[in-house]
Amino acid sequence: MRIWSYIDGRWRETETETPAPRWYALASEDTEYLKALGERLGLHPLSIEDCLSPYIHTPKIDDFGDHMFVVVAAMVAESAQPEPEELDIFLGADYLITYHDGPEAPPSIAEVASAISQGVNIRPGVDGLMYEIIDRSVDAILPRVSAMSEELDGVEDRIVVEGVSGVDHHRVLELRSVAGRIRRLIVPEQNLMLRLGRGEFHLVQPSNQVYYRDIYDHLVRVDMALEELREDAEVALGTYMSALNNRMNEVMKVLAVVGALALPATVITGIFGTNFDDIPGLHSNWGFAAMMAAMVAMAGSMAYIFHRRGWF
């Protein structure tokens, strides 16, 4: 748990609570403190229950008059690809509480804390601080989505150049799945930012509303990038399946040619292998040699014809 207070026009980290506007940054290890804080500040029990739930909730806003409960999407810290997690926020008149699962804070929390310690200008008020956190949560998504798109482009290029042997199509499916999971959280969050930016909630100052509308613009851009990523994944899978089918067709063509070349030998040996004693050449000294010569000649002739027609 970490606490910051808004003192003398700037946010400062403090060891204890102060009467000034304050920010409590809590993690899953601070559940007991969250419950105690909820009782003291009158936070709604259902909101506390949502915080402690192991499931990721859809982004939403619950307005309780004296405070708001906001659920937004954040990114898992130190993840190679965008993996969404839930970030819970309580906004009151003079306090902000953030709660996240796991001991390690999402990048947005860590970045805001670092900016405060470095003296970077932060929007005034607890609603301005909430904007800074949500804005960084959204901004953290796009670079990772771009990295996923570049990886997907590389996969598609390898399919074209190397075929299916050097490509893991499960990775393409994974990228498509991640894009879908993030988009299911991003789309409802767009509506939240519009509501925060239109003056629907009295706890958000008019001077900060325009900044929430700016987050909405960022979310639209992220949504477009995710949709493009999903479409690229579909194209890559289609290319992979097409290359796989072409490879299977080549294998089947080779097997068909081998089977066709073996057919004359199968017919001839089948005839001479029947239980009749009066087959021509059966008891001749040159019978076996003639049979072998006929089989080789027929197979060679068929191979020549197939090659002339470009079948192999």
Image: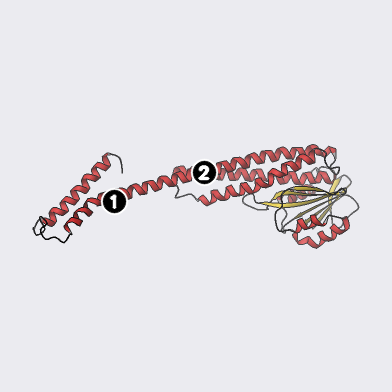
Q: Residue at x 58, y 43 (%)?
A: 230
Judged left or right of residue 300, residue 290 is: left
Query: Which percent across, then down, holds residue 37?
Result: 85, 58
As shown in the figure, which amino acid type bears the numbered disc 2? Ala
Check residue 236 in the rendering and tell me which mark sits there, or answer none.
2
Residue 27 appears in view: no
Few, some or many residues within 10 Å of mark 1 (<14, 14–19, 20+): few
Q: Residue at x 76, y 56 (%)?
A: 51
Residue, disc 1: 259
Vertical side of 247 occupied by 38: above or below: below
Which quadrant, please, contains the C terminus?
A: top left
Colour pattern: secondary structure
As shown in the figure, which amino acid type bears the numbered disc 1? Gly
Please report whichever mark, 2 or 1, sits nearer to the chain's N-terminal start: 2
Query: Which percent across, then down, holds residue 270?
Result: 20, 56
Q: Residue at x 22, y 48 (%)?
A: 299
Query: Which percent across, then down, holds residue 306?
Result: 27, 42
Q: Circle 1 sits in a helix, a strand or a loop, which is it?
A: helix
